[in-house]
Image (cartoon, rainbow, N blue to C red):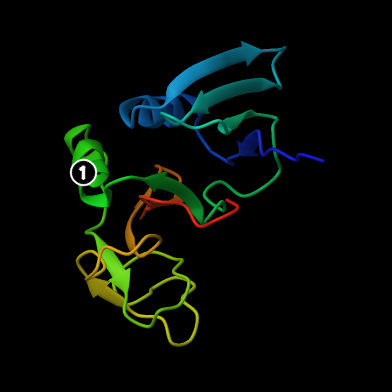
Amino acid sequence: MDLKLEVIVLPVSDVDRAKDFYEKAGFRQDADAVVGDGYRVVQYTPPGSECAIIFGKGITSATPGSAQGLYLIVQDVEEARAELVGRGVEVGEVFHDGGGVFVHGHGPGGAVGYPEGSRQVSGPHPERADYGSYAAFSDPDGNGWMLQEVKKRAPGR
């Protein structure tokens, strides 16, 4: 049985502000449908992705900005970061995990949600190992995204 992730729901406080941000970041708008006063669904897809994001009005009761750990896999983290920055998106510096542990969270020194033994080290992974280099950014509400460099996926993925 195949189970394919299709959509991730993002909680946002201002639908039009979120649209502006994701458009600026280069995501493709797939839908913007209004159904009455209490429901609006907007869908965007990151370039090259088969999974989309949706946000809107009446979509979720989650707190705006509470979606964290949204990973965008890229071939070259420095190049992807530069492109986003060139589009006007604030993206943190490229880093790797000096502790060799799964990285999540934002900010230098692991300000949010770093597991014990994890530590951010400036710059890409020294050997540019797959799954080893990152850069973080957030949308205007604080939903947290991570660029992760993967040139060759692990077997079975």
Q: Residue furthest bottom?
A: 117
Q: Residue at x 35, y 80 (%)?
A: 119
Corner quadrant of residue 20 = top left
Q: Nearest the camera: 34 or 1?
A: 1
Residue 37, percent from left and from top: 69, 16
Q: Does residue 50 sit above or below 77 in this rendering?
A: above
Viewer can see residue 11: yes
Q: Which residue is mark 1?
A: 79
Residue 34, percent from left and from top: 65, 13
Q: Residue at x 37, y 60 (%)?
A: 130
Corner quadrant of residue 139 = top left
Judged left or right of residue 45, residue 99 is left
Q: Does residue 12 sit above or below 15 in this rendering?
A: below
Judged left or right of residue 10, residue 29 is left
Q: Residue at x 57, y 33 (%)?
A: 51
Q: Residue furthest right?
A: 1
Judged left or right of residue 60, residue 27 is left
Q: Residues within 10 Å of mark 1 (few under 14, many from 20)?
A: few
The local secondary structure at tag 1 comes to helix
Residue 97, percent from left and from top: 34, 74
Residue 32, percent from left and from top: 57, 15
Amino acid at the residue labelled 1: Glu
Viewer can see residue 143: no
